[in-house]
Amino acid sequence: MAVTIKDVAKIANVAPSTVSRVIANSPRISEKTKKRVREAMEELGYHPNFIARSLANQTTQVIGLVMPASADKTFQNPFFPEVLRGISTAAHEKQYALQMSTGETANEILDGVMQMVQGRRVDGIILLYSAVEDKIIKYLQKECFPFVVIGKPFEQVEEITHVDNDNYRAAKEATEHLIDLGHKRVAFVGGSIQLVVTIDRLLGYEKALRTADIPYKDEYIIHEEFLKEGGQEAVSELLSLEEPPTALVVADDLMALGILNTLHDMGIDVPEQMSIVSFNNVLLAEVARPPLTSVDINIFQLGFQAAKTLIQKVKDPTEPTKRIIIPHSMVKRQTCKEY
Amino acid sequence: MAVTIKDVAKIANVAPSTVSRVIANSPRISEKTKKRVREAMEELGYHPNFIARSLANQTTQVIGLVMPASADKTFQNPFFPEVLRGISTAAHEKQYALQMSTGETANEILDGVMQMVQGRRVDGIILLYSAVEDKIIKYLQKECFPFVVIGKPFEQVEEITHVDNDNYRAAKEATEHLIDLGHKRVAFVGGSIQLVVTIDRLLGYEKALRTADIPYKDEYIIHEEFLKEGGQEAVSELLSLEEPPTALVVADDLMALGILNTLHDMGIDVPEQMSIVSFNNVLLAEVARPPLTSVDINIFQLGFQAAKTLIQKVKDPTEPTKRIIIPHSMVKRQTCKEY
DNA sequence: TTGTATGCGTTATCAC
DNA sequence: GTGATAACGCATACAA
């Protein structure tokens, strides 16, 4: 059995409660006994038992993370390591640990979340994605459990604390950039329409077209969670239209990479024959050939602010609902050209 | 306050201990009372408190994960989401939760591990990488805490349970493939020499050369944790040699991608003027242009087996030390050509 | 400033 | 089969 607070108390000649107070650095303990107790802790190699502490004060110092289903393609996106890094940094600063959901399907994940919450394993939860009709959000709301969403909630935007980009504006700007370059036939290649981010970016794209008086065509809109096969299909579909697009707004760097390669195989030059703007600006964007013009959404900050906000909320449940918008910026590289 | 075992006991008209036995599905409780208790649990919406359970039976059902420092480039490698998926799958099967280390530097991470262990937050630990002179391993050994390493431990290979590929043989085979194609000037581009995997692959590479009676040249060995700038430098360095290599063994797909692009920029055709074999076979390998010939190391299995093995070890501490080797296989795509 | 007593929600060891 | 009761290790209200 490990060394406990009692052992320390004994050899420091104080009561266990005193040791507890020293750990909490209570101001009402004399420096003298503090020192004595600390020496005893040192001597015995004492380390507080977090589980016992959690049980006593009903708080775990753990944040639960809900990732997309691991069976999901989304999981492979470089977006996740980077948000994780942001979350991890903020959590570490405030001495919080991170616990991940496991599960391959949405239902398994929901079960996992229920375990975390009801089992009192975590103090709060961060959802790393936002999808339509999300059961998890509904559950957490019902339970009044502290949580923060990364991305825009599908419903009740005003009532749910979230950290997001202004994806509508970002997509609008990206599209406008293409339009400014003279493109009139601009297509949109998005990820799963189940993801709110896809919806927002699509709306921004539409808005830009409308403002520029460019007709919106259904054939120009493609949704796929593809990487390789899908990319090929999507691209050849677009190119076989009577009026193929001259520019693409692509929802994600990873997709853009796939498209870039498919175009390369088809002998279509980027940016000479096709311009591309994508989103996220992960490392891949720099390393692609040609390097991708991509909208930097500041993924690290997305995670960092989410964790920070959640921790505030956990510590003070009266904190009001917040919406935090992380700024974006377009990084121009070499995939866009005048038309 | 949430509903506890006592509440259930009360309305089921039994003692709390009986409820506990029902939860554990003890055989010495009559089906009749079991049913009654379960109905009560249902009615009240009871969920067991994991923290309390952990305290009582000294086990958390949580596995700790030690990732590389988040400041580290390694963190960005697509390797991690994939091992995570493997670990997550195995953990989920056995009802274990996952807790991640946080921290930007090696020391911060060591502190975190100490918290996990001493704070009794986790039942066992998986190290997702293996580096030379690792303090964490030494600490875990000293504490006799159950852990498994993914990769080969730098020291005491026989005494540490680990899950690894035969990286020596994998690199040897990759190099031999190049040699079989007629290449005599084969260079090695590896990641951090602090990583044991790099060392193993380098040794395999050397062995292949020696076996084929090809002299080993220091100028042909490059180590860098680069992605973009580094890649450029490394490549131009190699190419400016009097006898530049005609083929490259690259330790990682991500690096290979960088090199591919640098070569492309320099107007050097792959595979016509330069052949490349890389490792890991992540999605990137397929999506690169040309698609990479890459050694598939079965990352998912690496994670899956690690978690499975750790759980066995946690449940039965007398389990002997194990070394599990996950098979690899070379996936030939389009980056190699006869010389 | 410090000690005592009690509770946190379970599990486990006795009894009966 | 089931019920008291004592841990598990710590925090805290209340005393002193």
Image (tube, coloured by chain):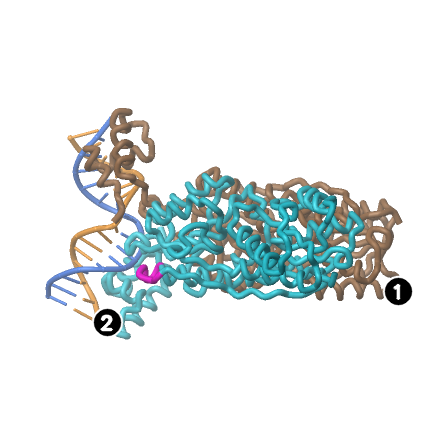
Chain colours: A brown, B cyan, C blue, D orange
Output the chain of dot 2.
B
- What residue would you read off at disc 1? A242
Circle 2: residue type: Arg
Q: Quadrant of residue A264?
A: bottom right
State the residue at coordinates (83%, 63%).
A239
Residue lying at the far bottom of the rendered structure: B31
Callouts 2 and 1 in the same chain: no
Quadrant in the picture for the C terminus of chain B: bottom right
Give the SS element for disc 1: loop
- What residue would you read off at disc 2? B28
Q: Does residue A229 lie above or below A288 as drawn? A: below
Q: Nearer the viewer, residue A242 or A73?
A: A73
Crowd class of label 1 (few under 14; some 14 to 19; many from 20; radius 10 Å): few
The location of residue A225, given as percent across then percent down, is: 67, 61
State the residue at coordinates (40%, 58%).
B161
Q: Does residue A54 lie above or below B181 as drawn? A: above
Circle 1: residue type: Glu
- Region in magenta: B314-320
Residue A144 visible in the shown view: no
Give the SS element for disc 2: loop
The location of residue B182, given as percent across then percent down, is: 71, 62
